[in-house]
Image (spheres, grey):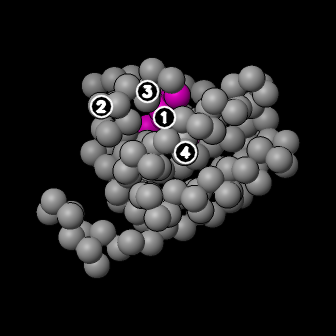
Amino acid sequence: MLEHHGYERSGRCTVSPRQDGAALVLHVAGDLDVLTAPTLMTHLDVALSGGAALLIVDLLDVTFLSSAGISVLVETHRLTEPAGVSLRVVAEGPATSRPMRLMCVDEIIDLYPTLKDARAGRPATAT
């Protein structure tokens, strides 16, 4: 395990896609950083080429989120918006929603506190 600013990091990331009704959910777990962000991008590319109209990226099990991971989400939003694909990101807590709010990503991409809220389309309110 790597230690960075008091947080233990595994250096690993997994992305597990699953169909959930009309939505394609990508559950991401572990560290989403410069080394692992390309894995997420590959899964997002596959999802977009598959014609998903609703794409939910669940980051609740992400333990570390770097600017590289955030950049992948912003780039995906840039690609999905003109195509009419709804991108929803589930993020809650200091490892995920906090860095995205600090970088004002929540002004571009709607963040949801739970998967249930993301399915329903109820964005999180800033606290």
Indicate which disc, 1 or 3, sits on the residue closer to the N terminus: 3
Indicate which disc, 1 or 4, sits on the residue closer to the N terminus: 4
Judging by the rendered image, the residue that carries numbered circle 1 is 112
- For mark 1, does the 10 Å Cα neighbourhood hold few (<14), some (14 to 19), or many (20 or more) residues? many
Judging by the rendered image, the residue that carries numbered circle 2 is 102
Amino acid on which disc 4 is placed: Val
Quadrant where the N terminus is found in the figure: bottom left
Residue 33 pos. (x, y %)? 42, 58
- Mark 4 or mark 2, whichever is nearer to me: 4
Q: Nearer the viewer, residue 92 or 66?
A: 66
Judging by the rendered image, the residue that carries numbered circle 3 is 106
Q: CA distance from mark 4 to mark 2?
A: 17 Å
Q: Is residue 110 magenta?
A: yes
Residue 31 pos. (x, y %)? 40, 62
Amino acid on which disc 3 is placed: Asp
Q: Residue at x 39, y 72 (%)?
A: 11
Residue 113 pos. (x, y %)? 44, 38
Q: Which mark is residue 67?
A: none
Quadrant where the C terminus is found in the figure: top left
